[in-house]
Amino acid sequence: MRLQGKVAIITGGNSGIGRSTAQLFADEGAKVVIVARDAQRGRAAARGIQANGGAAHFVPCDVRLAEDCQRAVGTAIEVFGGLDVLVNNAGIIYRGRDVLGTTLDEWEETFAVNVRGAFLMSKYALPEMIRRRAGSIVNVASYFGLVGGGQVAAYCASKGALVQLTRAMALDHAGDGVRVNCVCPGSVHTPMIQEAWERFGEGAPQVWAAKHPLGRVAQPEEVARAILFLASSASSFVTGAALPVDGGITAA
Ligand SMILES: NC(=O)c1ccc[n+]([C@@H]2O[C@H](COP(=O)([O-])OP(=O)(O)OC[C@H]3O[C@@H](n4cnc5c(N)ncnc54)[C@H](OP(=O)(O)O)[C@@H]3O)[C@@H](O)[C@H]2O)c1
């Protein structure tokens, strides 16, 4: 049990990578707080964990909003008595858009969820972690935070910002006993990519698989295991890292 008794918040914990992470964390003994907007999927995710004997609580929250983030952190501390781990996983993407094709609203929304959300959640989580002089924050960035990609301009910029926020926070809070790292996944089989495949049409899974030296996309559990490593004491001397979980894409 690598997270026995720990309290973990996972934003976007009702779908894809976040949902797998919530389940894995609960399997490893954590009390999990699932944070997202869709209450139906959020409660279902929490119930799934409880049905397996785990501890989970859903908090409806839009990570773009400061008051929602503050309430989510407050609820975690109130319900489970503290906070040890924050996973900033909630994210969105507008595909098929270079800068010319990106509206100002799309740009602002991408940054509001992918960057401001992580900033706000961290801002409200850090005081409890600093008070305990222990904590681990794991941001879910992307390989598009490490290298560029075509037609995803706002997403690339936002994930690059998240990688740099990770490094800045790691330096600022190393002396507080709080570690901050991020994972940079390649393509992962979640609703986010399913949507892209449907838009692309026939042959999409093969095209996406071929981009990865390992010859396939990841399953969400494979990213969840990397998040678990960074969240747990297995990574006790790791901070400020941007860990590619990308089937080798960024090795090229
Ligand atoms: N799938 C990939 O290929 C891939 C690759 C690299 C990185 N990533 C990153 O991995 C993370 C998870 O993506 P995924 O693939 O698991 O996608 P997903 O299944 O679409 O999940 C996205 C999650 O973000 C939540 N979310 C979106 N906007 C939110 C908001 N304003 N407030 C709170 N929660 C919000 C969604 O919940 P609600 O809609 O209910 O709020 C959902 O739980 C994202 O940061 C994504 O950029 C994914």
Image: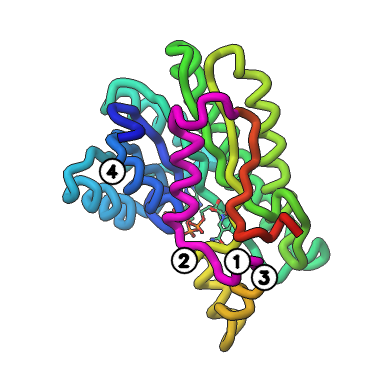
Labels 3, 2: front one: 3
Q: CA distance from mark 1 to mark 2?
A: 21 Å
Label 3: how many residues lie within 10 Å, few (<14), some (14-19) or many (20+)? some
On the rendered image, what quadrant is the N terminus found in?
Answer: top left
Q: Position of residue 70 (x, y in %)?
A: 45, 28
Crowding around mark 2 (Cα neighbors within 10 Å: few <14, some 14 to 19, many 20+) is few
Cα distance, mark 3 to mark 2?
A: 19 Å
State the residue position of label 2: 191
Residue under pointer 3: 211
Nearest the eye: 60 or 204:
204
Question: From mark 2 to mark 4, how far is it between C-alphas?
Answer: 23 Å
| Relative depth, front residue between 50 and 247 | 247
Q: Of helix, strand and loop, which one carries label 2?
A: helix
> SS of the residue at dot 3?
loop
Residue 214 badge: 1
Vertical order, 241 against 44 (above or below): above
Q: Nearer the viewer, mark 3 or mark 1?
A: 1
Q: Nearer the viewer, mark 1 or mark 2?
A: 1
Magenta part of the chain: 211-238
Q: Secondary structure at mark 1?
A: loop
- Among the two numbered marks 2 and 4 on one chain, the one whose residue lies closer to the N terminus: 4
Q: Residue at x 53, y 21 (%)?
A: 178
Nearest to N terminus: mark 3 or mark 4: 4
Please name the residue that numbered disc 4 is placed on. 27
- 227 vs 51, left or right, is right
- How far apart are the two marked residues, 4 and 1, measured between alpha carbons? 28 Å
Q: Relative to 146, does residue 218 appear above or below in the rendering? A: below
